[in-house]
Amino acid sequence: MSELSLLLIGIFGYLLGSIPFGLILTYIAGFGDIRSIGSGNIGATNVLRTGNKILALNTLILDCGKGAVAVWISTWLAGVDIGLLSGLTVVLGHNFPIWLKFRGGKGVATTFGVLLISSWPVGLSTCLAWLITVWIFRISSQAALVALIIAIFTALIWSTHLHVLMVIALAILGFIRHHDNIKRLINGTEPRIY
């Protein structure tokens, strides 16, 4: 595959990832700019703070979906390895969207979508880890961090070397994006989901 093709697939993943579904849906629903409430994040957890569970669920599905679509299309067009590249760029697009001055979400749902398509055992175990942790502790960020760690361990069991590297990269990115949450978790001040 040519360098131009790689660049185009990378750009495709980034631009797809940079669609801020949480921001768009809350505007359409009449809640205004989601960045002005709660954590200021554009993801599903902050959308849930509007009190509209359906809106939050739709945000979750769409953010997860764009990760899945990016990997699926890129894999179909150019093979598994290129699909993994697109998986990285779609999450980068969500986290640093050009339309929002590179201030986006934390990429958890989009990462789940990437993992579900690139390796369903890894994706499924990661999603289950998130669900179980959030059900027990009611803290979304804690569940995300636990899920990302589980993703690495399950990738080591189920995945190719290149896929493991992608999962590690996504986990590191996820931890970096949650640096403020980690501080609050340590201090015991991280808000819970009710």
Image (tube, rainbow, N blue to C red):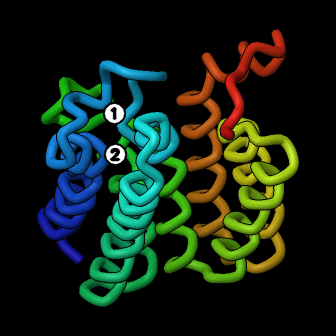
* Residue 110 x/y as whole percent: 45, 57
- Of residues 21 and 171, the one nearer the viewer is 21
Compute the Cα span from label 2 to label 1: 6 Å
Q: Is residue 31 left or right of residue 72?
A: left
Residue for point 42% across, 66% down: 61
Residue for point 21% across, 47% down: 29
* Residue 173 x/y as whole percent: 55, 38
Q: Amino acid at mark 1?
A: Gly
Q: Amino acid at mark 2?
A: His
Of marks 2 and 1, which one's residue comes earlier in the chain? 2
Residue 149 in view (yes/no):
no
Where, quadrant-wise, is the C terminus in this rendering?
top right
* Residue 27 x/y as whole percent: 17, 40
Task: Please give the residue where the numbered disc 2 appears in the rendered image.
Answer: 94
Residue 173 in view (yes/no):
yes
* Residue 35 x/y as whole percent: 31, 25
Residue for point 62% across, 58% down: 167
Task: Please give the residue where the numbered disc 1 appears in the rendered image.
Answer: 104
Determine whether label 2 and label 1 are within 8 Å by CB: yes
The label shown at residue 127 is: none
